[in-house]
Image (spheres, rainbow, N blue to C red):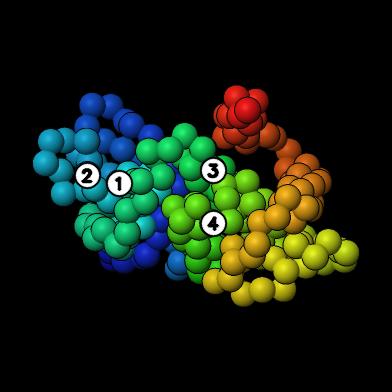
Amino acid sequence: MQDELTVRGIVLTVTQLGEYDKRLVVLTEQLGKITVFANGARRKNSRFAAVTQSFTMGSFTVRPGKNTYTLCEAVLERSFLDLTMDVEQYASASYCCELMDYFTREGVGGKDELNLLYMAFMALLSGTPGAKAVRAAFAIKLLDIEGEMPRETEAAAVQYVLSCPISKTFLFRAGEDSVKQLEQSAKKELNRVMDYPLRSEAILQSLEKLKP
């Protein structure tokens, strides 16, 4: 039996399995993106219930298998469950998680990616600089972290996101021009490097059509 490992991460996706279990995709600081099976997590009074929710940050003690991990212990660090209470916030957080799922992989440490996702969740909850701006800035910063973002740009808002530390990615004034610059740049570069659309984009587009 391989030794257990303790990693810090955020749950990107949750899939229900059978009657009592869950399959998690977790972005971790140490191991990158990993698949974790949480046996019994859906049972009443399961000790894993709180920490196996979407957008949850915690410490996960796992036992390695062939290509996946089994959850042995977990400690909740921060719940972002409030993001599920607002449709746009939920869709925006899902968008960030889908992008993270696309660009990260197992075996490559995800410290910067984890910090960026955490800061995006905090920005969404605060309402500043707004969900649209958070999504666009997140995409640009993630592309930059992954080495997929050209740095030649005259757009001031894009220059700011590229040059600032991760902790300040979302600390800008979200004027209409700035948000438009970010959205256009993010869309252009994502279309260039991605080979399939995100599910959350369809939800966000529907929400946009409903706005007055």
Q: CA distance from mark 2 to mark 4?
A: 30 Å
N-terminal-most mark, 2 or 4: 2
Q: Which residue is mark 1?
A: 52
Which comes sooner in the sequence, label 4 or label 3?
3
- The answer to which of 68 and 139 lies nearer the viewer is 139
| Residue 69 in view in this figure | no
* SS under mark 2: loop
Is the Cβ of the residue at disc 1 closer than 8 Å to that at disc 2? yes
Displayed quadrant of residue 28: bottom left
Image quadrant where residue 73 sits: bottom left
Which callout, 3 or 2, points to the residue nearer the camera? 3
Q: Residues within 10 Å of mark 4 (few under 14, many from 20)?
A: some
Q: Position of residue 180 (x, y in %)?
A: 76, 48
- Looking at the figure, which quarter contains the C terminus? top right
Point out the tag, 1 or 4, that comes first from the N-terminus. 1
Q: Residue under circle 3? A: 92
**Amino acid type at image mark 3:** Ser
| Label 1 to label 3: alpha-carbon separation | 20 Å
Residue sitting nearer the eye, 75 or 128:
128
Residue most toward the front? Answer: 212
Residue occupied by mark 2: 49
What SS does tag 3 mark?
Answer: helix
Tag 4 residue:
128
